[in-house]
Amino acid sequence: AWQYLPHLRWGIIVKIDTIEAFAPVYALTKWYLFLGILTTFGVGFVSLLVSKSISRPITKLSKTAELIGKGNLEQKVNIETRDEIGQLANSFNRMVDKLTDSIDQNRKLSGAVEQSPASVMITDNKGKIEYVNSKFTELTGYTLEEALGQTPRILKSGKAGQSKSTCWPPAPA
């Protein structure tokens, strides 16, 4: 670049190398590139920490659910957070406690029905026999396998003793 100075009748020529002229720009570019890379890694690291803190309790809950699904009802979910995941874990633990209680009650009832001195037959809503206790098989002569899937009408088929079959009310048509 040059400039004529008329009052001095001189011309000034100024020359600067491109590298020298753009040195501040190159320095800022390197600085911003460094800050960009540093920020990217920082954000990535923080994102990884946040995602782990979110997924770790969910993974723990999932693994415990799998163990419980395999029959291990002694498992508890130990997640001590006050967020939605903690609430879900507490609900899950209450559900397992209720399931354990329900299974215990079912075992007691099942034992009582099996040991009952009375004949017990359970049918589905279509009248098909789903369960008979040992007293039923003893009184009627039918085995469990013979009775399952049949209707109470089998008691009138003649296999059971005459005095035994009359103790049952007529089956619905």
Image (tube, rainbow, N blue to C red):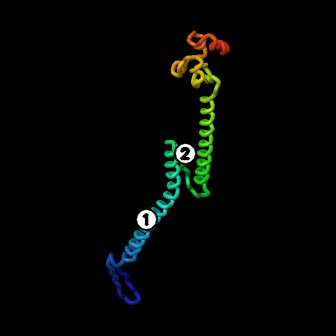
Give how far across and how far down residue 3 sits, in percent. 37, 82
In the image shown, does 98 or 155 lie closer to the viewer?
Answer: 155
Question: Nearer the N terminus, badge 2 or badge 1?
Answer: 1
Image-quadrant location for residue 172: top right
Q: Is residue 20 left or right of residue 80?
A: left
The quadrant in which the N terminus is found is: bottom left
Q: CA distance from mark 2 to mark 1?
A: 43 Å
Q: Secondary structure at mark 2?
A: loop
In the image shown, does 90 or 54 lie closer to the viewer?
Answer: 90
User: Is the residue 24 above or below the residue 64 in the image?
Assistant: below
Residue at left 59%, top 43%? 100
Image-quadrant location for residue 166: top right
Nearer the observer, disc 2 or disc 1?
Answer: 2
Residue at left 58%, top 25%? 133
Residue at left 67%, top 14%? 169
Give the residue at mark 1: 41
User: Is the residue 173 above or below the residue 21 in the image?
Assistant: above
Residue at left 58%, top 53%? 85
In the image shown, does 91 or 161 lie closer to the viewer?
Answer: 161
Q: Which amino acid type corresponds to the residue marked 1 in the rendered image? A: Phe
Give how far across and how far down residue 9 sits, in percent. 37, 88
Give the residue at mark 2: 73
Q: Residues within 10 Å of mark 1 (few under 14, many from 20)?
A: few
Q: Is residue 166 left or right of residue 15?
A: right
In the image shown, does 56 or 109 lie closer to the viewer?
Answer: 109
User: Is the residue 162 above or below the residue 64 in the image?
Assistant: above
Q: Which amino acid type corresponds to the residue marked 2 in the rendered image? A: Leu
